[in-house]
């Protein structure tokens, strides 16, 4: 998981928000406080000066209204005495001037260095405005020499309702702004200290919130890796503590759910693994999301390569079907993957995976290998057809001859015996066919049992060969390649006699005049090999594997002529298999055929008998 950046951390965000909140609050309070304080200080300063000016105006009016005698001091001299207090006692007031209304002449000034201005005409516009408008005129200016701010005030002097002059005052208001600067510095320092304390408290407070969240993050990462053993520490009973408790409860539930899911997954995996049928699951778009081993083996694909592959492409149906067609398929589909060399057929059944809302969420395909079933069905159909054919031919012949006899041929002394002989021959042929079918039916049944006895197979084989050698009609010589020592094998004599009878009979049927039939027995470690070979026409290579099939004949016309049913080798194969052995054939066209079969053999038994 990507690491969270420093400035994206909730811890830093919380501290920043907390500090910024305090900073904004203090700035708002500070601006309002400083503004109001500045206004208050300026108002107090100006009110204090104004009160003194009002008192001065009263004294000036008294001096200006006073009747003077020649020996009395002049108005200028009296005003100088009145203004002397401002020059000595008040450091805030720089200068006070008294101006007469009509002539705008300066009657007096408080500053001793400016006594030369007395008697001169004032040029200050603010003084003229106050007398004309009969109201105070004030302003804050910058003193050019010092650069300090000064407050200039011009107040009209009234006697009754008549303006008789004005008082012009210059005061140092810079002290007020110096006080404000000092207060601002104090406030800034206090703000910095408050922010530092707030940051520390914010960090501590943020840790109390982010520590449980960090623990939950670690637990979530551990849960993502499958570790449900650790728990989140509960730091308190507040909302975060409740969240931690809930998170631990969620962890427990997820652990139980994960264990249940894992158990179900293992069950499903075990079921899918041990199923003989192939199973394929897709998503809602028809892409493969699951395939078990039997399905991969049936389709001869790798599980890793087919995941996310469309199922219609996997089943080689993309030319004939779409995924939507498979969703609507109610019956099985037969998938024929047969080649010229091998037959291979699968049957596919489809089932839709649906959510509770009815929305299609995917498709399940179950594959069955029906190659053997199809082969059995084909063999059954061929078997029924062969039986029908084999029975129909003699029955048709018998019916023809019997109809001829019924029409009067029985009275002909030459024809009647021939017809009756043909009828008897065909009857015996049907009896042999039915007996062979009954024999095969018994061997196919589950309750088929052999009556085994220990037999010296060399003597047993020689006796059967002697029987055929005495009864043979064609000019064929017998050659024996049999061991001299006794070989004891546990067999059912009747069944093994029938096996050898069927094999030797075939060898004699297909042996030419003057030919030779060879009989042999070979010992192996755990079995003996019994063989019968002839010098007949042989069997084509492409047919050698079919001669043990029921009703199969290499030369059908000759076999029927010789009275064969086509079941002899099939019966021999079943009986040999029942003894735990196997049977096979080797042949070369024009040189002959060799039929061999094996039987289980234990040398220890031989030693005991010997």
Image (cartoon, helix red, strand yellow):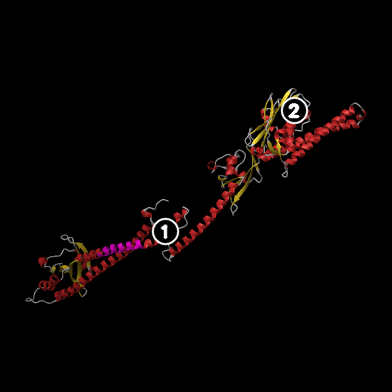
The x and y percentages for residue 414 are 90, 26
The x and y percentages for residue 484 are 68, 31
Q: What residue appears at the point 77 percent right and 39 percent down from the top-left corner?
A: 438
Corner quadrant of residue 176: bottom left
Reply yes or no: does residue 198 show up in magenta: yes
Corner quadrant of residue 400: top right
Reply yes or no: does residue 91 show up in magenta: no
Front-lying residue, 609 or 541: 609
- Residue 508's tag is 2
Q: Which residue is mark 1?
A: 215
Q: Can residue 134 be seen at all in this image of the molecule? A: no
Q: Quadrant of the C terminus?
A: top right
Q: CA distance from mark 1 to mark 2?
A: 93 Å
Front-lying residue, 85 or 349: 349
The x and y percentages for residue 191 are 29, 63
How packed mark 2 is, by other alpha carbons closer than 10 Å (few <14, some 14-19, many 20 or more), is many
Tag 2, which secondary structure? Answer: helix
| Magenta range | 186-204
Q: Main secondary structure of the magenta part?
A: helix
Counting every numbered tag in the picture gives: 2
Tag 1, which secondary structure? Answer: helix
How packed mark 1 is, by other alpha carbons closer than 10 Å (few <14, some 14-19, many 20 or more), is some
Q: Which residue appears farthest toward the left when viewing the image?
A: 71
Front-lying residue, 8 or 255: 255
Corner quadrant of residue 386: top right
The x and y percentages for residue 385 are 75, 36
Against 327, residue 52 (above or below) is: below
- Residue 330's tag is none
Q: Can residue 69 be seen at all in this image of the molecule? A: yes
- Looking at the image, residue 266 sits to the left or right of residue 121; the answer is right
């Amino acid at each position: 998981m990507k690491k969270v950046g420093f400035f994206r951390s909730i811890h830093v965000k919380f501290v920043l928000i907390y500090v910024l909140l305090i900073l904004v609050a203090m700035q708002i309070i500070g601006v309002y406080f400083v503004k109001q304080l500045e206004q208050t200080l300026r108002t107090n300063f100006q009110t204090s000066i104004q009160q003194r000016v009002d008192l001065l105006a009263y004294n000036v009016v008294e001096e200006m209204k006073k009747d003077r005698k020649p020996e009395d001091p002049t108005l200028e001299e009296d005003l100088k005495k009145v203004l002397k207090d401002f020059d000595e006692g008040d450091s805030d007031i720089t200068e006070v001037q008294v101006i007469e209304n009509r002539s705008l002449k300066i009657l007096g000034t408080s500053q001793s260095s400016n006594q030369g201005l007395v008697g001169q005409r004032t040029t200050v516009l603010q003084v003229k405005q106050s007398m004309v408008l009969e109201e105070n005129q004030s302003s804050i200016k910058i003193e050019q020499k010092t650069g300090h701010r000064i407050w200039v005030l011009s107040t009209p002097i009234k006697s009754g309702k008549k303006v008789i002059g004005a008082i012009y005052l210059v005061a140092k208001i810079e002290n007020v702004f110096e006080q404000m600067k000092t207060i601002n510095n104090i406030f800034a320092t206090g703000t910095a200290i408050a922010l530092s304390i707030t940051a520390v408290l914010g960090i501590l407070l943020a840790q109390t919130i982010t520590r449980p969240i960090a623990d939950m993050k670690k637990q979530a990462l551990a849960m993502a890796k499958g570790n449900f053993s650790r728990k989140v520490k509960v730091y308190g009973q507040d909302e975060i503590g409740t969240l931690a408790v809930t998170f631990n409860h969620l962890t427990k539930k997820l652990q139980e759910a994960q264990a249940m899911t894992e158990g179900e997954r293992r069950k499903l995996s075990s079921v899918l693994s041990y199923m003989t049928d192939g199973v394929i699951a897709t998503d809602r778009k028809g892409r493969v999301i699951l395939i078990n081993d039997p399905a991969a083996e049936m389709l001869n694909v790798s599980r890793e390569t087919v995941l996310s592959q469309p199922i219609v492409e996997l089943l080689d149906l993309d030319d004939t079907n779409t995924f939507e067609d498979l969703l609507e398929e109610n019956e099985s589909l037969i998938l024929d993957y047969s080649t010229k060399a091998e037959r291979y057929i699968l049957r596919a059944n489809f089932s839709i995976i649906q959510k509770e809302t009815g929305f299609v969420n995917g498709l399940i395909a179950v594959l069955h290998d029906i190659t053997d079933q199809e082969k059995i069905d084909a063999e059954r159909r061929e078997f029924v057809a062969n039986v029908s054919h084999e029975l129909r031919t003699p029955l048709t012949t018998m019916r023809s001859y019997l109809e001829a006899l019924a029409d009067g041929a029985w009275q002909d002394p030459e024809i009647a015996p021939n017809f009756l002989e043909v009828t008897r021959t065909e009857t015996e042929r049907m009896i042999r066919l039915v007996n062979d079918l009954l024999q095969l039916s018994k061997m196919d049944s589950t309750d088929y049992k052999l009556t085994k006895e220990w037999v010296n197979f060399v003597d047993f084989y020689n006796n059967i060969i002697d029987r055929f050698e005495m009864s043979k009609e064609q000019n064929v010589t017998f050659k024996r390649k049999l061991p001299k020592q006794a070989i004891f094998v546990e067999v059912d004599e009747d069944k093994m006699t029938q096996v050898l009878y069927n094999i030797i009979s075939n060898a004699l049927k297909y042996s030419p005049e003057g030919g030779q039939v060879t009989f042999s027995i070979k010992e192996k470690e755990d079995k003996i090999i019994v063989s019968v070979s002839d010098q007949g026409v042989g069997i084509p290579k492409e047919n050698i594997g079919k001669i043990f099939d029921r009703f199969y004949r290499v030369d059908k016309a000759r076999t029927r002529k010789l009275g064969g049913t086509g079941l002899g080798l099939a019966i021999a194969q079943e009986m040999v298999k029942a003894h735990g052995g196997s049977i096979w054939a080797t042949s070369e066209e024009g040189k002959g055929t060799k039929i061999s079969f094996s039987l289980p053999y234990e040398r220890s038994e031989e030693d005991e008998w010997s």
